[in-house]
Image (cartoon, rainbow, N blue to C red):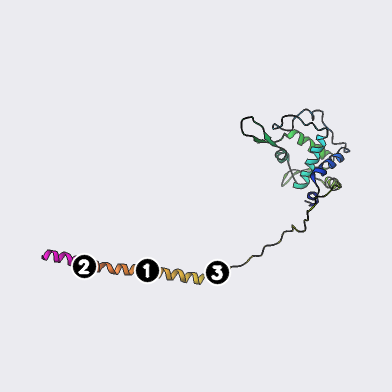
Amino acid sequence: MARTIFTKDPVKFIPALAAALKSVPEFEVPEWAMFVKTGVSRERPPVDDDFWFTRSASILRQLYIHGVVGVGKLRTRYGSKKDRGGKPDRFRKAGGKIIRVILQQAEAAGLVEKIARMQHGRRLTQAGRDLLDSIEVEEKAGLNFEDVAAKPMEVVEQDTDIEETTEEVTEVAEDKGEALVGHDSGEPEVVEDIKEAEEAKDGE
């Protein structure tokens, strides 16, 4: 995906895109939009009058960044933790109705197309990408993607002398073998000494 989207401040980019979507006739606010919650983790419905266009702009930005995205991933993206009182909070996905209707409206406007081949979901069309690229806002300061270019790592080959290692192992094994042989050769002498001591005791 294009890297220009990351240079645009989302705090300013999303409201500017939402204002542009108001002029698109396919984006209509349903009658029920201001009376339903966006998910089970929310306590109240949205109070912002431009919520529908703001959420639409945010979803289009997610499609621009991630490519092919489905309703399930967007539900996770817009989910939040649910307050369960004395119990620990738990994450809950956002509702899928609002997200699905927004994607259908964007598809009707020609900004989004459905993909069902290698990946399943929706992605921006060329018209959708052109719309997002046409939004001019103040860019973030201090971002230079040329300095973040991937550089290949240098691979240093280590010389491993297998013959020297084999000789060291052989020498250690020979040393252990000599020690064992010397230990075995001394056993008969010890046995003879014991026999002589027993014969001397019997003679007495």
> Helix or strand or loop: what does disc 3 sit on?
loop
In the rendered image, which residue does mark 3 sit on? 160
Residue found at x 69% / y 36%: 80
Q: Is residue 101 above or below residue 193?
A: above
Please tell me whether residue 125 belongs to the stretch shown in magenta.
no
Q: CA distance from mark 3 to mark 1?
A: 27 Å
- Circles 3 and 1 in contact, beta carbons < 8 Å: no
Q: Nearer the viewer, residue 108 or 152?
A: 152
- Position of 114 with respect to 164 (left or right) is right
Residue 101 coordinates in the image, percent (x, y): 78, 35
Q: CA distance from mark 3 to mark 2?
A: 52 Å
The amino acid sitting under disc 3 is: Thr
Q: Is residue 175 above or below residue 68?
A: below
Assess disc 2: are there few (<14), some (14-19) or many (≥20) residues with their C-alpha within 10 Å of its C-alpha. few
> Helix or strand or loop: what does disc 2 sit on?
helix
Residue that protrudes farthest toward the right in the picture: 23
Q: Give the prevailing secondary structure in the magenta stretch.
A: helix
Query: What is the span of residues highlighted in magenta in the rendered image?
Result: 191-204
The amino acid sitting under disc 2 is: Asp
Residue 7 coordinates in the image, percent (x, y): 80, 50
In the rendered image, which residue does mark 2 sit on? 193
In the rendered image, which residue does mark 1 sit on? 177
